Image (cartoon, helix red, strand yellow):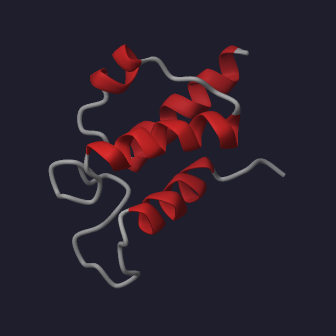
Amino acid sequence: MPQDVGAVVEKFVRSAGQVSDDDPHFDRRVDLIEMGYLDSVGVVELLAYVAAEFGLGIDEETWAMMDPLSIDQVAATIRAGRDAT
C-alpha cells in the first residue's frame, strides 16, 4: 500500500511545530513559515527528516522555490523525487 506522503509530513510538522489538532488555521496548504508553524530551525529539521524518512535529498534551490512552503508542496516534491528514481 502506498504511503500517504502528505500525512507523514503533516505528522512531522505538527510535532516539530507543536501544532494542536484543533488549530483552526492549520491545514496542508498553509505557508508554514509565514504562519509561524516552522522557524528556520524547523525548516532544517524538516529537510533532514525528509532525507531520513524518504531517502530523498532535496537541494536548497528546490526548497527555496517552494512558495508557499506548505505540506502539500513538500509532499508533491517528495512524490516527484520518488517518481524520478
Query: Which quadrant is the C terminus positioned in?
Result: top right
Image side of residue 78 versus residue 13, left or right: right
Q: What residue is drawn where x is 57% and y is 44%?
A: 49
Q: Is residue 49 above or below residue 80?
A: below
Q: Position of residue 20 (x, y in %)?
A: 36, 80
In the displayed image of the protein, which residue is found farthest to the left? Answer: 34
Left or right of residue 5, residue 77 in this image: left
Of residues 34 and 27, which is closer to you in this image? 34
Image height check: is 10 above or below 81? below
Number of marks in the image? 0
Q: Is residue 66 above or below residue 20?
A: above
Please state the horizontal and vertical placement of residue 44, each as a whole percent of the image.
40, 39
Instruction: List the single residue furthest toward the right.
Output: 1
Give the percent coordinates (x, y) of residue 71. 41, 49
For image coordinates 51% across by 23% down, the residue present is 58
Task: Please tell me which residue is depicted at 47% across the width and 67% down the height of the picture.
Answer: 15
Quarter residue 30 falls in = bottom left
